Image (tube, helix red, strand yellow):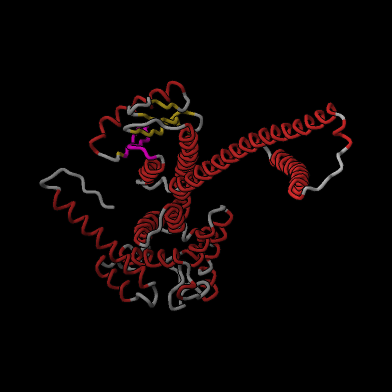
Amino acid sequence: MDQQDLRGLLRRDVQLNALSSVITIALLGMVIVLAYAVLTGLDMAQPLILDYPLVTLGAIGLLLAVIAYMAEQHRNLRGELIDAHTSLEKARDDVVASYERLAFAHEVAAIAGMLEHGNAVDQVLRASLEHYDADAAALVSDESNIIVRDPRDTHQANSAMVQASLAAVRTGEPVSVGQSGGESASLSIPLRIRGRLSAVLCLWRQSGRFADEHVDGLGLIGRVLELAMENRMLLAETREQLGGTLRTLSHLIDKRVPKYADHATRVAAHAVSVGMRFGLTGGDLVDLRAASILMDVGMLDLPDHLLDPHRLLSEEEWKALASHPDLGAEFVAKANLPHTVQEAVRYHHESMNGSGFPHRIAGTQIPFAARIIAACDAYESLIRPRSESREPITPDAAAREIAAQAGYLYDAEVVRALLKTLADERGCAQAARATAPENTAKVVCV
């Protein structure tokens, strides 16, 4: 029932109430007059109508018919208003249920946006288990994830959800299985990635069925997961393509700048490790790695004589060489890489005290990614200099030299994170060497 119909019912109710009030007042007035006449013995003139019994009976019958009609109309109207109220209550419940579905879908979308993190799927399953008051939740695919409220129910829940998943795979539609009367129930939603059925989202209860709104709600969650998983695949492909492009560019630079590709790869590895210590994730780490690989891409636009390590440069030539971060940032911008990559390339040779180049900015004016790359680049340049005119120093000596410039040339917090990363890498390498003679187990350094 829409709003116009409801207004019509209310208008009829007002009209019937007004008519009832008029008749009631008239009858009440007649009763009062008659009662007054009887009590006072007043001799009232007999109405002409009373001289004709048939007419009198007809008038009384008409009055009773009007009263009966009004009573019937009130009864019908009351029934319609009750139906309208019921419809409005149902509509309200539907709106509330839709809001709850959308709110939970928004929560799941926020979690699913982090699907590249290992525990994101488990978080979605745990949230679904709580929201739908289930006893187990699972994402069944090549690598299945299952969350169980009570570990003792794991075998039963796993068996039920596998059966439900097979049913969903066979039909390609949501499947709800269960009987009332205390038996367990399961609900499964097939997920399609790029049109191919790739996984099944399942819920399981020890007792009680899943309602129809649960099927709709979990179906919406399934659509959110489909989009998130497809986006993750697209992101992985894009990163792979980006990685290939970066490797190609680094090798192009390597032809003009000796040992650049290996140097940039090591700087990128250090930078990503340092970034992770600061809580950087996902796209931020991808951008940091890209900026590290492309930090000197501006060298491609410089004439060969400026890149000769054995040649002394004039002041003008040095200014031209020092412009390569800006040239690199322009190159990165033309490649449509993110602004954070452009800024990191442009400012990675700046120093905390303002003595760097090409813009001589200082402190927090320097983008954070550029500060990370600056410290990692300096460390690698000390232990593996690309110029034959410089002798390498030991990693410990390089670490001490970088630490001595903390807060002066390099960001102090970045230096601390870099030194911790280097210490962890050396400790892990020592552990690998120590276990190698006795044990063939692989030691993985993260």
Q: Is residue 25 visible?
A: no
Image location (x, y in percent) of residue 40? 76, 50
Q: Quadrant of residue 88?
A: top right
Q: Nearer the viewer, residue 291 or 234?
A: 234
Query: In this view, which residue lies farthest toward the left?
Result: 438
Look at the image and say whether residue 348 sits in the magenta stretch. no
Q: Nearer the viewer, residue 94 or 68?
A: 68
Vertical placement of 391 versus 45: above or below?
Answer: below
Q: Nearer the viewer, residue 442 or 309?
A: 442
Per the rendered image, the range of residues in magenta is 133-147
Q: Is residue 129 visible?
A: yes
Image location (x, y in percent) of residue 125? 37, 41
At x 42%, y 25%, the residue is: 168
Vertical placement of 364 versus 290: above or below?
Answer: below
Look at the image and say whether residue 136 sits in the magenta stretch. yes
Quadrant including the N terminus? top right
Image location (x, y in percent) of residue 44? 84, 44
Vertical placement of 118 versus 226: above or below?
Answer: below
In the image: residue 367, left or right of residue 117:
right
At x 41%, y 43%, the residue is: 131
